[in-house]
DNA sequence: TAAAAATTGTGATAAATGTCACATTTATAT
DNA sequence: ATATAAATGTGACATTTATCACAATTTTTA
């Protein structure tokens, strides 16, 4: 974890969020002055559950996981975040401390924006506020959707869905390097390492995917999709 | 479902939401002019998944369930809403159609607020916007939390948690009338009618609760809580 | 590079939960 | 009030998934 030494200003940021894209030059300048840009290596903690919430976090580069310590001290991955994306809004507006953790899965860069600054932008610029409301609404709907899916689908089906999620939504490629260990993958789908191993092995035996450690190729996306929907 | 004929104006509404409580007299008047207040009987549909979203819905009276049609056409109850509470914000800011349904569990009253009006209040009044952001943030965190719980806990534990949720959060009473059928309760905990029947029967046999159809008394809340936490 | 640690695979087994079929009770509508 | 429909309870059984124990492999560290 290191500070960003190169020239980095919100005004010319290539990874503006939708809310930030409605800000004018002056507001962007204000935002820039109240933000710090920090780099993280894979595996490093970006946000720690229980830490005080004084900053909004916005990830500009890299992949991260949002996870929560569940009942009886087991971590559960709530979602895989592909930047650019806000990763620390809900907790900041809810509590004095973060309700979840975020860790980098790949080399990542994150802007930490002072809460007071963010709040001022919200109050002063209604369009900014609306865009943020849209971001949160969208997150909430997705959360509904993923929770229903996780609950109703068999593990086979949900793991198939997740593989397609990685290939379609995260990497836009049928070949990718799974950025999770088998244990983490289990935390994502709500199961155990062993069961995940077995189901992936099953998929491979049946020629749905090719697999070598963390390198995965989806060979039959239509079939995987069918399993995801019916299985 | 019927229109509200009695005198009903936002200015003197006894069920103001936090966001609405920051509005001034003029804004409240504007809100009032752009809202309709409607009554529902238990069982009636308030919001239908797939319907066009032109209104924000705010429930002032009664209990409702938010649910979603999952993969393979099985409904899943996402949460039980105790009024006063917004029940239709996220979909409105996300999509052209509602992504979930809401149905009244008891006699209910709901204000439908024109989307354009709501948007104008958001743009014009930053404090209103902040309060709405807080509402959504809070919903999102709760959703994280409940999804992790549902995934990690055994059914025993999650059903115990839900019983305590009804007694502690919804009714503030150890005796209450469960506002759900056994099938609906199953949809809430992500299981089946039969299994719910059996686990509730178990709780009764072990003297944790008393039960007669839908009437339930929590007899040993500490023990239920222990089951809820350890499984 | 060797040693230690972390990750992964695999079989045997147990536990939890779903499924199906049917009886019984309760609620609803005519 | 009776007929009909909806909701509930229950047993037998099948299936899914977790758990445990241990070996094999890969990664990290000294």
Image (spheres, coloured by chain):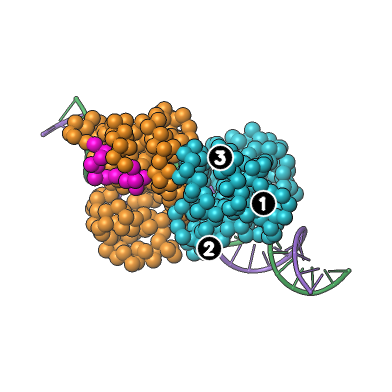
Chain colours: A orange, B cyan, C purple, D green
- Left or right placement of residue A192 versus residue B43 in this view: left
- Left or right placement of residue B115 versus residue A124 in this view: right
Q: List the residue tagged with mark 2.
A: B51
For this rendering, which residue is in front, A104 or A195?
Answer: A104
Identify the subunit bearing mark 3: B
Q: What is the CA distance from the residue labelled 1 to the residue labelled 2?
A: 19 Å
For this rendering, which residue is in front, A161 or A100?
Answer: A100
**Quadrant of residue A167 within the rendered picture:** bottom left
For this rendering, which residue is in front, A87 or B57?
Answer: B57
Residue located 58% across and 53% down the image:
B34
Mark 2 surroundings: few (<14), some (14-19) or many (≥20) residues within 10 A: few
Q: Is residue B176 visible?
A: yes
Give, as a single range, the part of the protein colored magenta: A9-23
Q: Secondary structure at mark 2?
A: loop
Residue located 66% across and 47% down the image:
B9
Reply yes or no: does residue A32 show up in magenta.
Answer: no
Question: Is label 3 or label 2 in front?
Answer: 3
Rendered image: mark on residue B23:
3
Q: What is the CA distance from the residue labelled 3 to the residue labelled 2?
A: 29 Å
Give the quadrant of the C terminus of chain B: top right
**Location of residue C15 with respect to A172 vertically, above or below:** above
Q: List the residue tagged with mark 1.
A: B109
Give the quadrant of the N terminus of chain B: bottom right
- Left or right placement of residue B212 versus residue B13 in this view: right
Image position, residue B37 (x, y; %):
65, 53
Q: Residue furthest front?
A: B26
**Location of residue A107 with respect to A225 vertically, above or below:** above
Verify CB contact (< 8 Å) between mark 3 and mark 1. Answer: no
Q: Is residue A199 visible?
A: no
| Mark nearer the N terminus (3 vs 1) | 3
């Amino acid at each position: 974890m290191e500070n960003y030494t190169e020239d980095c200003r919100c005004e010319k940021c290539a990874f503006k969020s939708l809310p930030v894209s409605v800000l004018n030059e002056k507001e962007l300048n204000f935002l820039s002055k109240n933000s710090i840009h920090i780099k993280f290596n894979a595996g490093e903690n970006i946000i720690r559950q229980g830490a005080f919430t004084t900053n909004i976090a916005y990830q500009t580069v890299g992949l991260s996981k949002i996870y929560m310590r569940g009942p009886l001290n087991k971590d559960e991955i709530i979602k895989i975040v592909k930047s650019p994306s806000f990763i620390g809004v809900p907790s900041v507006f809810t509590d004095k401390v973060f309700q979840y953790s975020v860790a980098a899965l790949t080399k990542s860069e994150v802007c930490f924006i002072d809460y007071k600054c963010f709040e001022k932008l919200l109050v002063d610029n209604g369009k900014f506020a609306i865009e943020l409301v849209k971001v949160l609404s969208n997150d909430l709907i997705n959360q509904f959707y993923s929770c229903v899916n996780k609950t109703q689908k068999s593990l086979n089906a949900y793991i198939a869905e997740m593989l397609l999620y990685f290939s379609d939504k995260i990497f836009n490629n049928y070949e990718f390097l799974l950025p999770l260990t088998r244990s983490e993958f289990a935390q994502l789908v709500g199961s155990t390492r062993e069961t995940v191993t077995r189901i992936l092995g099953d998929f491979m035996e049946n020629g749905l995917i090719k697999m070598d450690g963390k390198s995965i190729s989806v060979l039959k996306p239509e079939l995987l999709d069918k399993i995801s929907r019916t299985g």
